[in-house]
Image: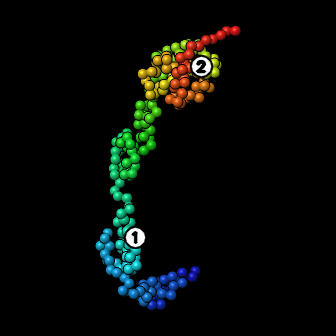
Amino acid sequence: MPPTTHKPCPTCGNLMHRQSKKCRVCYEQEKARPENYLERSCPKCGKSFTVHKTHVERGQGKYCSRECARSGSPTRKKQTPVVTCHTCGNSFEKYASEIRKNLHGKHFCSSECWATHNQRQNHAGWSGGQHGRMSPESRAWRKAVITRDKKHCRRCHSTERLEAHHIRRFTTHPELRNDVQNGITLCHACHVLFRNKEDEYADMLAFMASVTVEVWNV
């Protein structure tokens, strides 16, 4: 038989660790000084227990066990608030810190519900959709801008892969979407340079668009 890792206490006979000379209960009864221990009542379960006075001086020894300490700790999370999913209507728990960070006041129980809601006009980057840019009015505007610029890029004078660029943003200036004066012809390579930088180069592009194009055939 394998050797046991426990041996009986020479005082009370209870099993203890092999390296110990006596069990902890007998050791405390022999070595402990009663004047150093205080009788306290657990604020969680009401059970009476003893605690060393040095623990009380350090602000410890308030609870009788680790379970009571965790359940009664002021740093422990309070009851999690219950909110309603904006998409499916299901109720679920959400941390109060997350609710405070929520600026739009809508809650979603899953990424699928968030993705379902965050479409088209609900998306932060919604600009009217592809149907707005491909409407008959937009096509006519694009053709008028390129025709006005004699089918030349106003920056590099290229005639390849021409695109009509909105000088003022398509998203923030809906009243100028079909205004020919708000457009300028750029080739694809030049158009990439000004995308998402309309506010920075608006005045420069407006000046370039106002200059009449002269094409010399030599």
Q: SS of the residue at dot 1?
A: helix
- Dividing the image into 4 quarters, which one contains the N terminus? bottom right
Frontmost residue, 195 versus 134? 195
* Numbered mark located on residue 66 in the image: 1
Q: 90 above or below 49?
A: above
Q: Residue at x 49, y 15 (%)?
A: 140
Q: Quadrant of residue 12?
A: bottom left
Please state the horizontal and vertical placement of residue 101, each as a whole percent of the image: 40, 47
- Dividing the image into 4 quarters, which one contains the C terminus? top right
Q: SS of the residue at dot 2?
A: loop
Label 2: how many Cα within 10 Å (few below 14, some 14–19, many 20+): many
Q: 30 above or below 216?
A: below
Label 1: how many Cα within 10 Å (few below 14, some 14–19, many 20+): few
| Three-letter residue code for mark 2 | Arg
Q: Which residue is mark 2?
A: 154
Please state the horizontal and vertical placement of residue 119, each as a whole percent of the image: 43, 33
